[in-house]
Structure formats: structure tokens, C-alpha cells
Amino acid sequence: MAYPGNCLYPLSNEDQMAYAAALQEFETYQRFSRLLLSPENHKINGFVHINNQGQPDVSVRRADWNSWAQPGDSNRKCVRCYKQFSEAEPDGECRFHRHGKDCCGNPTPCTTATAHVHNKTCMSEIGKFIKTPRSSGQFDGRSYKVFGIDTEMVYTEYGMEAARATVVDVHGSLVANFFIKPTGRILDLNTRYSGVTEGFLDIAVSLEEAHRILFHHINENTILVGHHLSNDLKVLKLIHTNVVDTAVLFESRGRYQSLKVLAKRHLHKEIHNEVGGHDSTEDASTCIELVIKCFLR
């Protein structure tokens, strides 16, 4: 019969199983914690953080890399046709190749849209970011969890906004999966990459409700695993320090590999092949698999 700690009484079989599961969870947490980004790397890689004045901030060194715009600067560059336009006036003919310059073999753009799109976020939005909640105490079950997370995004008049969030555990089992209603007018569903299709707004929740769903599973101690996770947290408007970022883990000479490339190279697994776009559950699970296979075995 197992006796945890200084327990005076033998545990039932059910309690023994619960204790063993909790112990395994704690050990897994400890292993992942060795790969957490340091506070300095957290800033360098563009994560929103709390500065010395206690205010949300983002590293200027990676501000452009992370697609931030200075307050008052409304100039934007379309990520599809590369034309300059004003964020306040995105409407206009946008001619581009939907699948990149080699999509149709014709140098003339094969797709026309009625608006330009961009991926910048105004730095004034940082004031709206919130920290993941503190632990409620020693029995807070969220504190030793490790989750993979992925967020899919759509283009709106304000840039890129969250449209779907998925959370999985270290076994790849689904923890949370929901659609999010953007605040701005949607200009492009970005289905090839987001997997989001018409009608998602019918079942989407507000960003505030999305936070409530996430905070049911996550607190400030939870370890979140993802790829270029600063982008996911940015569109979720969250500040979280306990992160393992596969883009950073596999960084080489300042160059980042795509999740698709890493999955094929290290897991011998093909992802992002669905016609309907990326699968956020697959992406979140792949990040967990990469960390376990390449760093924890």
C-alpha cells in the first residue's frame, strides 16, 4: 500500500491512482520548466511583458519583427499586394496571388479582393492586455499543468485578430477549443492558414468570454507550449511568462523554422496539408510532440 509523504493512513486504490497521476503531472511540469524562456529571452522574442513601472510593454528591438505600429501611425502595407494604404481606409482593389507568386504560373495576379489587409497592431493596444490569473493557493490544479496552445487568426480592419483558440494537454487530448469574435470588420478569413470559414461568427464568443474559458484551465504558473507563441498571446491580448516556444528552441543563427518543416524533419509527420486550412489542434499537439521527442527524452 502506498503512503504519500507523512500520511498516517493507507490510501484507497482510487486515491493511490489519483496520487500517482498528480505525481506524474508534477514531474512532467518540472521537465518542461527547464525549457522555459528566460525573462530576457521573453522580451527579446517580442512577448508583451510587465516593465519596471508595472505597465504592459513590448521590446522595441523586436517591435517591427512582431508587427507593432506606433500610436498615431496609420500607414500600413498590404501583406498581399504590398501597396501602401491607410488603416482607416482599407477598401480598394487588391490584386495578388492567393497561394504565393508561384500559385498559377502567371506573373499577373490571379486574385482580386475589395480591401487591403495588414498584420500590424497599434502599440496603444498594449494597455488592453491582461495577465493570466494568480494561483488561488496550493491546491490550485492549474499550477502544474502543461498545455499546448495555438490560435488561428483572420484579417480585420485592425490587423490580425484571434478567431479560434485550441488548448491540448501533453498527451494531445483536447482541453479547450472555441471560436472568437473579432472586434473589427472582417476583411479576409485567411482560410488557407486559419482554417476559419464562413459562419464561424454564429458560434464565436467574445474575447472576454475567451479569457474566462482559458482561465478555467490556466493560471500564471501554467506552462504554455507553442510556435511563435508571442503572436498567439498578442492576438489573445494576454501576458504570460511561463512559455516554451518551439520557434525559439529550434532557432539557428537567428533563423526560425516553420512548424511544418520541424514536424517533417523531427517527427516524420506531414502537417498543414488540409485544403480547408491549418488545424489548430494539430499545431498545438505537434508543438508538444516536438518538445518531448527532441528535448525531454
Image (cartoon, helix red, strand yellow):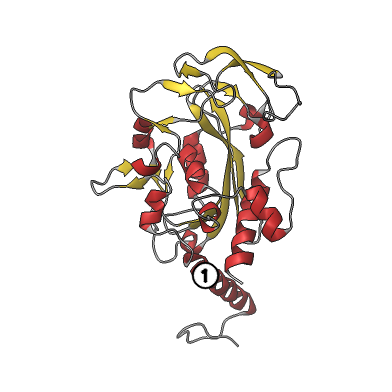
From this viewpoint, which residue is outermost toward the left? Answer: 53
Q: At 34% across and 41% down in the image, what residue appears?
A: 60
Quadrant containing the N terminus in the rendered view: bottom right
Residue 189 coordinates in the image, percent (x, y): 63, 27
Q: Nearer the viewer, residue 81 or 295?
A: 81
* Residue 97 appearing in the image: yes
Vertical order, 109 against 133 (above or below) = above
Residue 87 coordinates in the image, percent (x, y): 45, 19
From this viewpoint, which residue is outermost toward the front? Answer: 107
Label 1 Cα crowd, 10 Å radius (few <14 / some 14-19 / many 20+): some
Residue position for label 1: 31
Q: At 52% across and 61% down in the image, what residue appears?
A: 145
Quadrant containing the C terminus in the rendered view: bottom right
Q: Amino acid at mark 1?
A: Arg
Q: Nearer the viewer, residue 98 or 276?
A: 98
Q: Secondary structure at mark 1?
A: helix
Residue 233 coordinates in the image, percent (x, y): 47, 44
Q: At 47% across and 84% down in the image, what residue appears?
A: 7
Q: How many badges with numbers are in the image?
A: 1
Vertical order, 96 against 192 (above or below) = above
* Residue 174 appearing in the image: no
Residue 284 coordinates in the image, percent (x, y): 62, 51
Q: Nearer the viewer, residue 131 or 137?
A: 131
Q: Nearer the viewer, residue 198 or 277?
A: 277
From this viewpoint, which residue is outermost toward the top? Answer: 92
Vertical order, 126 against 173 (above or below) = above
